[in-house]
Image: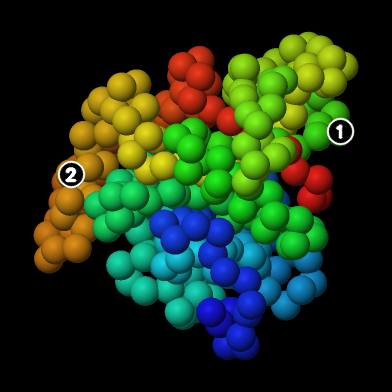
Amino acid sequence: MTNATGTMCAMKAPHAHFHPFVPAGGVGSRLWPLSRADAPKFLLDLTGSGHSLLRSTYERLIDLSSSGVMIVTGRTHAQAVRSQLPECSESDLVLEPSPKDSGAAIGLASAIISLRDPEAIVGSFAADHVVEPTEEFHRVVEEAVQTAATGRIVTIGITPTSPSTGFGYIRASESLGLEAAPSAMKVDEFVEKPDEDTARSYVRSGEYTWNAGMFVAPAKLLLSHLSANQPELHAGIMEIAEAWETDERDAVMDRVWPSLPKIAIDYAVAEPAAAAGDVAMVPASFT
């Protein structure tokens, strides 16, 4: 396998059916005026590396992938994304006509990939993370993929440093006993963005990790939870996905997308899946 710079890479994908994708949305409000609607932070080089956060994310994932990396972004960012990721094929560039929450973006990517590969394990990774060291990230993702292969939706847990209300919180207490993923734990509870008092109690207890916004899961399992909890959203993304490899792609997208419910994947899938016992967590020591 070659990496993004064209040099040979010895690392093999952790699973033959692993397909990562990157939801790259945002309106550029958090780092305004440096970040703006037409130049959200994932398109900027904020670390002085010479690469945007999106490019760095892509390069962090490409060596783990069995088939490339899909990007889900807004149509307004299409030209910039194509410029930064010229190796990304048009069929792997999913352009949203208008902003929606993560449920639609992650659901649609998973649906497209599941129709290409019925055995797919998908991975969703944010476009604007700075992760170091990459070797530890790869190790954690490999464990997450192996855990997902046992039929679970897997989150990656970060040790909290403050009672932040901007993160989801994961409580996991029991090892799954997986030889291929020794760190994997069964998730007892998943709580999306609690209030400050609740977050403070979670951090004080030492029983919770932050949800890093990374999900690895069998595509069929993720979609089945989406169907059970958000049937209208599931029906819409499946209609778009079924037209994806046809000449009707844009017409179906334009017709169906505006009607899709707006909901975060955490509420649509992660919380109810955790309640059903279908969520695991792999703790991470990368920053």
Label drawn at residue 183: none
51 versus 66 height, above or below = below
- Residue that appears at 26% across and 25% down: 231
- Residue that appears at 53% across and 79% down: 1
> Hey, what amino acid is under mark 1?
Thr
Q: Residue furthest front?
A: 179
Residue 45 visible at all: yes
- Residue that appears at 63% across and 29% down: 176
Quadrant of res 92? bottom left
- Residue that appears at 48% across and 25% down: 278
The residue singled out by tag 2 in the image is 239
Quadrant of res 3? bottom right
Most foreground residue, 255 or 167: 167
> Hey, what amino acid is under mark 2?
Glu
Residue 36 visible at all: no
The span from disc 2 to disc 1 (Cα, nearest Å) is 42 Å
For marks 2 and 1, the one nearer the N-term is 1
Q: Residue 235: x, y in percent?
A: 21, 34
Q: Is residue 86 left or right of residue 112?
A: right
Q: Is residue 157 left or right of residue 14?
A: right
Secondary structure at badge 1 equals loop
232 versus 45 height, above or below = above
Label drawn at residue 161: 1
What is the count of numbered marks? 2
Display colour scheme: rainbow
